[in-house]
Image (spheres, helix red, strand yellow):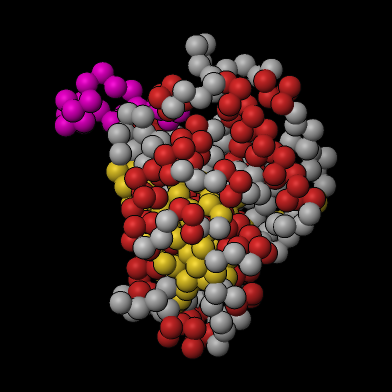
Amino acid sequence: MGNAYIVGAVRTPGGKKDGKLKNWHPSDLGALVLDELVERTGAKGEMIDDVIFGCVSQSGAQAGNVARNAVLSSKLPESVPGTSVDRQCGSSQQAIHFAAQAVMSETQDIVIAGGVEVMSQVPIGSNIIDSFKEGHGQPFNGKGMTERYPGVQFSQFAGAEMMAKRWKFSRDDLDTFAYASHKKAIAATESGFFDKEIVPVEGDLPSGEKEMVTVDEGIRFDASLESLSGLKTLSEDGVLTAGSSSQICDGAAGVMIVNDAGLKKLGIEPRAKIVSLALAGDDPVIMLTGPIPASKSVLEKANLSISDIDIYEVNEAFAPVPLAWAYELKADKERLNVNGGAMALGHPLGGTGAKLMTTLLHELERRDGKYGLQAICEGGGTANAMVIERLS
């Protein structure tokens, strides 16, 4: 089996709900990262064998194969195909998995994997809600599922509360972790750690004027533990708040994956090697625990222990997810989401996997680290995990 290398990784800044990026068409935002990857790597458009994009709410502007539409909105030639992936919040990490598998099998040499979600235009769950309105049926009430899980209403919010209860995380534990996410994101932004990975995007101001957006909009630079502690819980008897949950976000990200033949075609050196990939299915009711078995599996495949990993990105869908992951993996929380996570930076659903991988790669390079691990929980109780090794 061949190798899979990362030669480029970029992302847009995260736009907050109804913020400066709200008017971007998803295909155009996706095209922006495609063009930037080609420019930074020096690739010729016709060299790209495929574009694989993650997108969760594939309705409205994000329907009709947004990956192909992003290609057609970009400077890439029409000869470049594209396909869209939905593995819920891990969609663009799954796109990276598929790209890696393609180049490792040597059926393709150069593939761009990424994702996009403009949640201000296409709200979370809109594809499901629209199906209810149009009478096209419901996704979770098939006979087999209802018999297997009688009376269950699948909900990530309920699952996050279940996790907090199972691992005995208090409201204060979650608020403290959320505050730390903002502090780390603020420090990383002010220190310029994100500058190399972010593609500036022209945004719209409420006045109608244009402004180049270079900073993630979701960061609360005035965040305090007191303000987070004062937020109302999402459920009457729960411990989660909007502050300890991921933010709605508009954004796109892309990663160029190649094999040895692809390196020769491009004439460049690899930045990182994909060491191992893993998936996991877990309890779909609690739903969000999948990163734990997926990470254990990916470490075993890599013949590494958690202590070998320099930094880890575990998506902050809700605060209990990375906290429970760190507890079960016996991970050093000082290496976890070191520049903040989705509670501060936003979670553009189908784009998050590539967004986190972009940050993971750049931060490994900045620190001269060797190994990085990424894991994402997903609707339905699945998860993706990956280990990469920095090479340059």
Would you say 379 lies left or right of 350 here?
left
| Total residue callouts | 0
Q: Nearer the viewer, residue 49 or 341?
A: 341
Instruction: Read off the magenta span.
Output: 135-160
Snapshot quadrant of residue 368: bottom right
Would you say 90 lies left or right of 354 here?
left
Q: Based on the picture, tell me whether residue 123 belongs to the magenta stretch.
A: no
Q: Nearer the viewer, residue 309 or 2?
A: 309
Residue 111 in view (yes/no): no
Question: Residue 337 placed where, x, y %?
Answer: 59, 47
Question: Residue 244 placed where, x, y %?
Answer: 59, 29
Residue 36 in view (yes/no): yes
Residue 10, placed above or below residue 351: below
Question: Residue 222 placed where, x, y %?
Answer: 79, 33
Q: Based on the picture, tell me whether residue 153 belongs to the magenta stretch.
A: yes
Q: Residue furthest top?
A: 236
Question: Residue 274 placed where, x, y %?
Answer: 44, 67
Snapshot quadrant of residue 16: top right
In the image, what residue occupies the spot 42% across and 39% down?
328
Would you say 135 lies left or right of 340 here?
left
> Which image quarter holds the N terminus?
bottom left
In the image, what residue occupies the spot 18% across and 28% down?
148
> Which image quarter holds the C terminus?
bottom right
In the image, what residue occupies the spot 75% across and 50% down?
189
Q: Nearer the viewer, residue 12 or 302?
A: 302
In the image, what residue occupies the spot 51% across and 36% down?
323
